[in-house]
Every structure is written in C-alpha cells, then in structure tokens.
Amino acid sequence: MDGMTKCFETHSPEETRALGRKLGEKAASGELFCLNGDLGAGKTVFVKGFAEGLGISEDVVSPTFTILQIYESGRLPLYHFDVYRIGDPEEMDEIGYEDYFFGEGVTVVEWSDLIRELLPEDAVRILIEKTDGGDDERRITVTEYRHEDSRN
Ligand code: ADP
Ligand code: MG
C-alpha cells in the first residue's frame, strides 16, 4: 500500500481531541477512518474531537456494547463503530455495515484491525500509541490512502 503518513505527538487528552477535531472539520461524505491502539490509548478521545469537528453537539461515548452509534446533528452523519466485542465478522453483516461504510456519512471504526477483511483499501488509518515519554504522551500516526491518479 502506497500511503501518505503523518506523525503527531500529543501530550494531553485535549491535544488528541484537538487533532480529532481538525480531521473532523475536513472529513468528507463517504470517508472511513480506521482507529487502532490499545485499550486506553485515546481512540474515543479522538472520536469526541472528530465529532466536534463535524459540528455534532451530542456527547460521544464508545459504543462498546451496541457496536454502532449514529450521530446526526452535524454537517454529515457520523457512524461510530467500536468492534472490540465482535466475535465474528458476520455480526457486521447483521448490522448492515456496508450501508454505513459506503454511505453518505462519515464512518469511524475503533479496533478496525479486528475486522480487517471488511475494510476498503482507501480508508484513512490512525494508530494511537502510548510512548515511554510519560502517562499523557501519545504518538498518533495517520496514514492516508493515495489514489493512483493523485501521484505526482
Ligand atoms: P480508547 O478508546 O483507546 O480505549 P479512551 O479514549 O477511552 O481510550 O481513553 C483514553 C484515556 O487516556 C483517557 O482517560 C484520557 O484522559 C487518557 N489520556 C491521557 N493522555 C492522553 C492523550 N495524550 N491522548 C488521549 N488520551 C489521553
Ligand atoms: Mg474507545
């Protein structure tokens, strides 16, 4: 995969949230954002900011038990998946995930590596990692898919 990678370092939840907000402001219809990183890395913090960037006013919580939460008060619908508890990718079929992944809104998926076979190639990948720099430090790697025709 030939992607464009950007690395960020954040030093507080607020900074991670602000980075999410920036990406949410730029997000376009049909885009899919895949989030990975250990429990407590900051995926949901990122999504809270992302939702703000889309102009969503509701409080965002991780849909760990419901798998999917939909927010419609923003500039575009946000489909927030948390697939941590998915036992079998077939459960995603039951939810009708394709209507969201390939729909009009913007999708974010926490723990997307657990459903890797269902993800389109052109998703934006975001990895959040703790560092040894301190409890509140995170390294955030954003890899955007580069289309054939945008190569220069
Ligand atoms: P995840 O969804 O990845 O399991 P959460 O976003 O729910 O993780 O939780 C991340 C936790 O880490 C929160 O308690 C948050 O306050 C804390 N935290 C500390 N530093 C950071 C940081 N730089 N970025 C994001 N979260 C941070
Ligand atoms: Mg979470």
Image: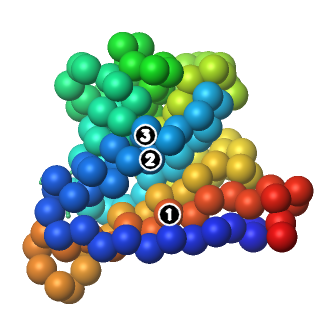
Q: Which of marks 1 and 3 is in front?
A: 3
Give the position of the C terminus as an image quadrant: bottom right
Instruction: Work out how far the residue at label 2 is from the one at label 3, CA to CA, in angstroms.
Output: 4 Å
Q: Position of residue 26 (x, y in %)?
A: 50, 41
On screen, 134 above or below 77? below
Q: Position of residue 64 (x, y in %)?
A: 31, 34
As helix, strand or loop, the secondary structure at mark 3 comes to helix
Q: Do the residues labelled 2 and 3 touch (CB within 8 Å)?
A: yes
Disc 2 marks which amino acid? Leu
Q: Position of residue 92 (x, y in %)?
A: 57, 29
Give the position of the N terminus as an image quadrant: bottom right
Q: Answer whether residue 39 is visible to the viewer in this image.
A: no
As helix, strand or loop, the secondary structure at mark 1 comes to strand
Q: Residues within 10 Å of mark 3 (few under 14, many from 20)?
A: many
* Nearer the observer, 134 or 93: 134
Left or right of residue 110: residue 97:
right
Query: Furthest-bottom residue in view?
Result: 132
Disc 3 marks which amino acid? Gly
Q: Nearer the viewer, mark 2 or mark 1?
A: 2
Instruction: Work out how far the residue at label 1 is from the one at label 3, CA to CA, in angstroms.
Output: 13 Å
Left or right of residue 150: residue 126:
left
Instruction: Work out how far the residue at label 2 is from the one at label 1, CA to CA, in angstroms.
Output: 10 Å
Q: Name the residue under label 3.
A: 24
Q: Which quadrant of the picture is home to ligand 1?
A: bottom left
